[in-house]
Image (cartoon, coloured by chain):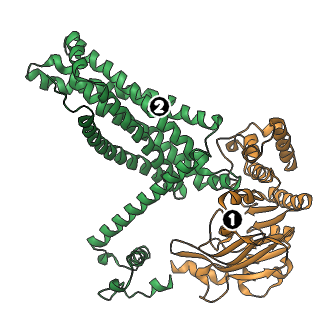
Chain colours: A green, B orange
Amino acid sequence: MCRSREINLDSPLPFGVESRRLSTFMQDAEYAMSAGTVTHDRRMFVHRLGKLVLDFLTLMGDLALFTLSMFRWMIPGWPRANVLWPVMYQIGVQSLPVILVTGGFIGMVLAVQAYEQFAMMHMENQLGTVVNVTLLKELGPVLAAVMLAGRVGSSMSAQLGTMRVTEQIDALTALGANPVAYLVVPRFLACFLLIPMLTLFADGIGVLSGWWFSTHVLGVNSFYYWHYSRAFVNAFDLWSGIIKSVFFGAAISLISCHRGFHSRAGAEGVGQAATEAFVYSFIAILALDFMLGFFLMELFEVLFPKVVIV
Amino acid sequence: MNSFVEFRDVHMRFGHQPILRGINLSVESGKTLVLIGESGCGKSVTMKLMMNLLQPTGGEVRWSGQPVQSFTEREIVAERLKFGYLFQGAALFDSLSVFENVAFSLRQNMQLKESAVREIVQERLRDVGLDAASVGAKKPAELSGGMRKRVGLARALAIDPEVMLYDEPTTGLDPIMSDVINELIIRTRQRRHVTSIVVTHDMHTVRKVADRVVMFYPLSRLAPHEPQILFDGTAEDAFRCDDPRISQFVRGEARERLLELNVA
């Protein structure tokens, strides 16, 4: 990088912008920043914004390549049962308690919050509708995914990060195993296949707890609760929640494994990888929820064009 | 000219930090090459480049005279199995038992019967002085540092490599266990006729195992046109050398480097 060292940073156009290709310019800019040759007060808002955008694009590109290599290894590296089962046990079975507790509370919280509004309009009997639609379409899948990201995502990323730092990932390669096939594929499969079931558990317990709280504590009539629920909740609501959850599961596993693979050394590096795994997964879940919600709404109108609810 | 691994003008840099510059090196078959040099001068990176765990940013690494870039991915995986790598911290898989660790590459790469795997694992563990019956079921976390290194060696030797790479094999071990490891390096070479490459800071190891010593110097302390390999010769020559940078290193004397302490 001798070329970059010769850049005169005091001149008004430090990088000779007009004569270079954009990529070289970006490399130089990044170099100048990382090498600390640009002093603090020269780091204007636009520099930081540029760095942020570059970092984001690099991250997205790297994640995309990581995903591609995972898919490429999916078939040739299909995990053996003795590798896949422990991962599935850890991700599926051991997550069940937290998922059930979360689901149970969401159902009741929804009932509490919606009840007052409905009571004001004397529509308590229709409480089941809003509780169950919200639960199946939104909160069931999203909160199950958030719990999975917190419980499983950060632990996967810390585990793979430790393996990276202690050279165990290099050791896998050295012993003729592909780390992506051996570590990422089973985790992806486990998240991808099990999250719909965890979501169904969260949905189920949420529906029951919402019903129990509405009828036994808030005094809503049980017959009308189910009657209106059945009238307004359709299979598409349930399916849209399940479809979303599959995308959430894929995103959690890929982001967490990617963060683990790129963990920096030391306790701090691994800790940061675990934090990033959760934060990035959470953002991805909400972003996907928004995009899929919009897409599925459009899809519903295409599939069932003239549904008029009376 | 009979060398399995060869470096031709290899350059390596991480981000903007250059680590290796213009390295030319070939390793003679059946001999033991010891790499010495300060921490951060690129010794471990050199070992990883040899096995293609890292790819050089310039120049080429050759395996049996063929540039590694010309191999397909499948061939690289197969060729890599000709190497055994003893990692610095042994890098045992901590979710697997000692037995499973040693059996890993056998199960991964060969279609062997479970009884054959068991036999080989027992033999490899016996070779490094461990008893499969007593340590086989333990997890790596339950072992001492010396035992972990020996399990790591047994694992690296499981599928009869032609080249053994040892990354600081005696670091962190007591003097007796260090000597046990040195002895194992020599025995492994005699018994299996492997080519060995050892990265070490331990001058006992250098004296004991080296056929040839190569010393690297950190790029940050070199002028742009000085070669990075300071010394290439026998161990005796290294200890007799009058280049202050080399004699200081092999005798472990800081001298004018102490001045750097006062800067901060």
Place residue B241 in its image quadrant: bottom right
Element carrying mark 2? helix
Question: Amino acid under label 2?
Answer: Ser
Asked whether the beta carbons under mark 2 and mark 1 sit within 8 Å of each other, the answer is: no
Vertical position of residue B15 compared to residue A262: above or below:
below
Answer with left or right where residue A27 lies relative to residue B171. Answer: left
Answer with left or right where residue B86 lies relative to residue A22. Answer: right
Crowding at dot 1, Cα within 10 Å, few <14 / some 14-19 / many 20+, comes out as few
Tell me what residue is drawn at x 91 percent, y 57 percent: B191
Question: On the image, numbered disc 1 is attached to which residue?
Answer: B71
Crowding at dot 2, Cα within 10 Å, few <14 / some 14-19 / many 20+, comes out as some
Image depth: mark 2 or mark 1 in front: 1
Q: CA distance from mark 2 to mark 1?
A: 44 Å
Taking depth in this image into account, of B129 and A169 the one nearest to the observer is A169
- Residue A81 in the image: state x and y as whole percent: 63, 34
Res. A95 mark: 2
Q: Chain of mark 1?
A: B
Tell me what residue is drawn at x 33 percent, y 75 percent: A40
Furthest-left residue in this view: A121
- Residue A36 in the image: state x and y as whole percent: 41, 76
Residue B85 can be seen, yes or no: no
Tell me what residue is drawn at x 34 percent, y 45 percent: A288
Place residue B220 in its image quadrant: bottom right
Res. B88 mark: none
- Residue B173 in the image: state x and y as whole percent: 75, 57
- Residue B90 in the image: state x and y as whole percent: 70, 54
Furthest-right residue in this view: B190
Vertical position of residue B212 compared to residue B190: above or below:
below
